[in-house]
Image (spheres, helix red, strand yellow):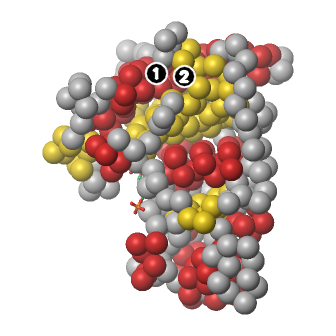
Amino acid sequence: MVVPQFKLMTIERHILEQQGRHPEATGRLTNLLYDLALAAKLIARETTRAGIANILGATGDENPHGEIQQKLDVYADQVIFRMNDHTGRVCVMASEEHDELLAIPAHHSPGYYVLIYDPLDGSSNIDVNTSIGTIFAIHRKLTPGDGHGTLADVLQPGSKLVAAAYVIYGSSTMLVYSTGNGVHGFTLDPSVGEFLLSHANIRIPSGGDHYSVNHGYQHAWTEGIARYVRWLQGLDEEKRPPLSQRYVGSLVADFHRTLLRGGVFLYPGTEAKPGGKLRLTYEAQPLAFIAAQAGGYASDGLGDILDIQPSALHQRVPFFVGERELVEKAEWFLREYDHAYLEQYARLRGS
Ligand code: AHG
Ligand code: MN
Ligand code: MN
């Protein structure tokens, strides 16, 4: 288990040290990660005083998915966009809260990176004071030239990610990031406004105690998923040691526990919704990148999330993430019992 140790290492210094390992590093990624850490501090400030600052509740508007936007969704979305629209580090952005790409304003020069984000993950938990989060994915610009980014720059496989990070606003605010050299966690000390290294080189432990799924959808599970969950519970003929169940309903919180304690999180697809609920580009890909960097594995049931070539910005994928052995077992149950479903999903996924 990763025991937090508070070395006086700020996230800024850590990012610089990480980039120092790449002689060709120009500092642009370092500065982009700084900017995201600052955005996280601003969002954290609002979440910790949401009840007071009249920032609770819904806006009355809907996002591209027909979901009611919470005030904090909009606040977080705007903070992240405004933090990055003028720095010259980013050539295009994409957000869960916007149907289309977010162009860099004409009077600012576009940069070299692509920023895709879920500004506020777990929105349904905001008003009941349960952990919520923010998720970031960073790609290099693919298309030639130094102009504005395009959809082709955004729709890249997760294996091409340059960096991924998430923030969890919980009993403390943590920022966890990877630039491909391991996974590192920082805890915000609000008294000085600094993220301090608390979890260096996080590795997903094996033998975790929990599985995490919303049992409210049990009626809709495919046979393979139903059998997989019974296997996790030690109820099938193999009688493996039973795992206990945790489900927060905020992906970032359920993922963070799985990253630190092991086990498995799953949000499977169903016959009615073969792609499930979670989005590939700003939820599954960045968390799969982090999981892989921590020795774990993430799958859509057919194979590695990081190998999927996205076909649409808000594309949904089934999501299984955690200890490799447990995720691969889910793939096995799907192959063994859910041929028709897998064919239906493979057609939907297209790649
Ligand atoms: P978001 O708030 O960004 O839309 O994400 C919500 C997601 C994710 O955080 C969580 O794992 C999932 O919704 C929970 O869905 P159910 O309530 O259907 O279990
Ligand atoms: Mn989300
Ligand atoms: Mn969200």
Judging by the rendered image, the residue that carries numbered circle 2 is: 188
The quadrant holding residue 146 is top right
Please indicate, yes or no, whether residue 320 appears anywhere in the rendered image. no
Residue 78 in picture, x, y percent from top left? 34, 28
Residue 218: numbered disc = none
Please indicate, yes or no, whether residue 122 appears anywhere in the rendered image. yes
Mark 2 sits near ligand 3, with its Cβ under 8 Å away: no
Q: Which corner quadrant holds the C terminus?
A: bottom right
200 vs 144, nearest the viewer: 200
Residue 41: numbered disc = 1
The quadrant holding residue 337 is bottom right
Q: Residue at x 48, y 17 (%)?
A: 190
Q: Residues within 10 Å of mark 1 (few under 14, many from 20)?
A: many
Q: Residues within 10 Å of mark 2 (few under 14, many from 20)?
A: many
- Residue type (three-letter) at the residue carrying disc 1: Lys
Q: Residue reaching furthest top?
A: 192
Q: Is residue 161 above or below residue 110?
A: below
Of discs 1 and 2, which sits in the foreground? Answer: 2
Residue 215 in picture, x, y percent from top left? 46, 72
Upstream in sequence: badge 1 or badge 2:
1
| Tag 1 secondary structure | helix
Q: Residue at x 51, y 30 (%)?
A: 172
